[in-house]
């Protein structure tokens, strides 16, 4: 089991990356006060298989970013409500959008103005009228690099799971959706029991192996729609959309039982490990942070009740 583990984790990650590159078309958000211009840009990109959405009202850009999660943004420069550069500055203030490429597409031909715009949060300045090939190539190159970078930034390198920052962002997204669609949402926190002893008795590499194996176990046994993160050292977090606490407890308790049955080959004797888990379900108008805190408290209760158990 342990021998094939690292290869399996790697293959799993490769799978994720392949899916990112090959299957999901690039998504581009276009902001232009002219409906006709926006439609023209959309048609060019759509002809290359790029998915688009357009806004003529820049005020809605933050809501649209959160909803659509584009790979790239195309901004008009001159709009009645605000300048494209002002919009770029607002977007760049949000940590989660700092890596999203922004391309200005405008009739502005003055180089000084173009360079100034680029210095304010933009990555490229394209002038209208533009050849479709030029626009498509620029969008593809920028989007590909941004995706590659993002795929690395959101992952934990030991396990390939989402890292702490990203799993909390996914919780926020799922929280918005659950409240909007009035669907249940559960959040689980896991912590390996007596993990210090594993390191002390068997060494740090063995500790790492246990962490990786639990990561793989969670990936294999949870649904594709669940998000799994490494929350900290030997702590994990799972976002389970459309799942109530009872259903989440059932699947995690099954994983807990099976994980505790694993024997890791070691000297002088094989090693077995367990984890404790706390689960909370979103209720009422509760914020995402409060949901995470409820799960944390449930985990605390699981530890104090004797470990190796799931508590709701
Ligand atoms: P408890 O059942 O109460 O959770 O006991 P515990 O020993 O697991 O307690 P605690 O959570 O305080 O200890 C976590 C230990 O995990 C401390 C740290 O040395 C170890 N650890 C954290 N990150 C890693 C890692 O990446 N690799 C390894 N091998 N050990 C780690
Ligand atoms: Mg305009
Ligand atoms: Mg811990
Ligand atoms: Mg622990």
Image (cartoon, rainbow, N blue to C red):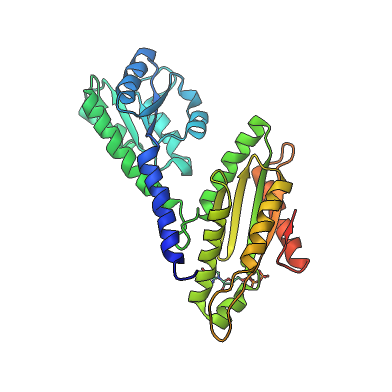
Instruction: Give the quadrant of residue 82.
Output: top left
Q: Where is residue 42 in the image (x, y as percent from the top left)?
A: 35, 21
Which is more toward the observer, 169 or 23?
23
Q: Which residue: 60% across, 55% down?
A: 237
Q: In this image, 5 relative to 109: left or right? A: right
Instruction: Give the quadrant of residue 181.
Output: top right
Number of marks present in the image shown: 0
Residue 200 vertical position relative to residue 18 in the rendered view, above or below: below
Q: Where is residue 127 in the image (x, y as percent from the top left)?
A: 24, 24
Which is more toward the observer, 43 or 261?
261
Q: Is residue 191 visible?
A: yes
Q: Is residue 115 visible?
A: no
Q: In this image, 158 relative to 195: left or right? A: left
Q: Where is residue 261 in the image (x, y as percent from the top left)?
A: 63, 69
Residue at the outermost top position: 36
Residue at the outermost right position: 305
Q: Which residue: 53% across, 65% down?
A: 213
Instruction: Give the quadrant of residue 139.
Output: top left
Q: In this image, 12 relative to 293: left or right? A: left
Q: Position of residue 154 (x, y in %)?
A: 46, 51
Residue at the outermost bottom position: 268
Q: Which residue: 42% across, 34% down?
A: 70
Which is more toward the observer, 285 or 47?
47
């Amino acid at each position: 089991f342990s021998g094939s583990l690292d290869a399996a984790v790697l293959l799993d990650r490769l799978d994720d990356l392949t899916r990112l590159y090959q299957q999901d078309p690039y998504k581009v958000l276009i902001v232009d006060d002219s409906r006709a211009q926006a439609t023209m840009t959309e048609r060019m990109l759509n002809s290359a298989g790029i998915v688009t959405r357009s806004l003529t009202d820049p005020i809605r850009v933050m809501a649209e970013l959160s909803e659509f999660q584009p790979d790239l943004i195309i901004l008009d420069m001159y709009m009645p409500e605000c300048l494209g550069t002002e919009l770029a500055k607002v977007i760049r203030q949000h940590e989660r959008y700092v890596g999203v490429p922004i391309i200005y597409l405008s009739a502005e031909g003055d180089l000084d103005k173009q360079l100034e715009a680029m210095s304010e949060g933009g990555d490229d300045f394209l002038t209208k009228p533009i050849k479709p090939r030029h626009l498509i190539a620029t969008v593809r190159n920028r989007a590909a690099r941004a995706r590659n970078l993002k795929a690395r930034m959101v992952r934990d390198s030991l396990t390939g799971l989402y890292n702490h920052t990203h799993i909390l962002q996914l919780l926020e997204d799922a929280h918005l959706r659950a409240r909007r669609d009035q669907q249940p949402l559960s959040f689980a926190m896991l912590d390996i029991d007596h993990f210090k002893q594993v390191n002390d008795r068997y060494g740090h590499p063995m500790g790492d192996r246990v962490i990786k194996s639990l990561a793989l176990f969670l990936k294999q046994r949870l649904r594709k729609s669940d998000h799994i993160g490494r929350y900290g050292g030997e702590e994990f977090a799972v976002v389970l959309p459309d799942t109530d606490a009872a259903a989440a407890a059932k699947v995690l308790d099954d994983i807990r039982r099976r994980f505790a049955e694993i024997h890791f080959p070691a000297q002088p004797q094989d090693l077995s490990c367990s984890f404790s888990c706390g689960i909370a379900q979103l209720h009422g108008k509760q914020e995402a942070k409060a949901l995470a805190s409820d799960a944390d408290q449930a985990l605390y209760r699981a530890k104090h009740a004797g470990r190796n158990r799931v508590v709701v």
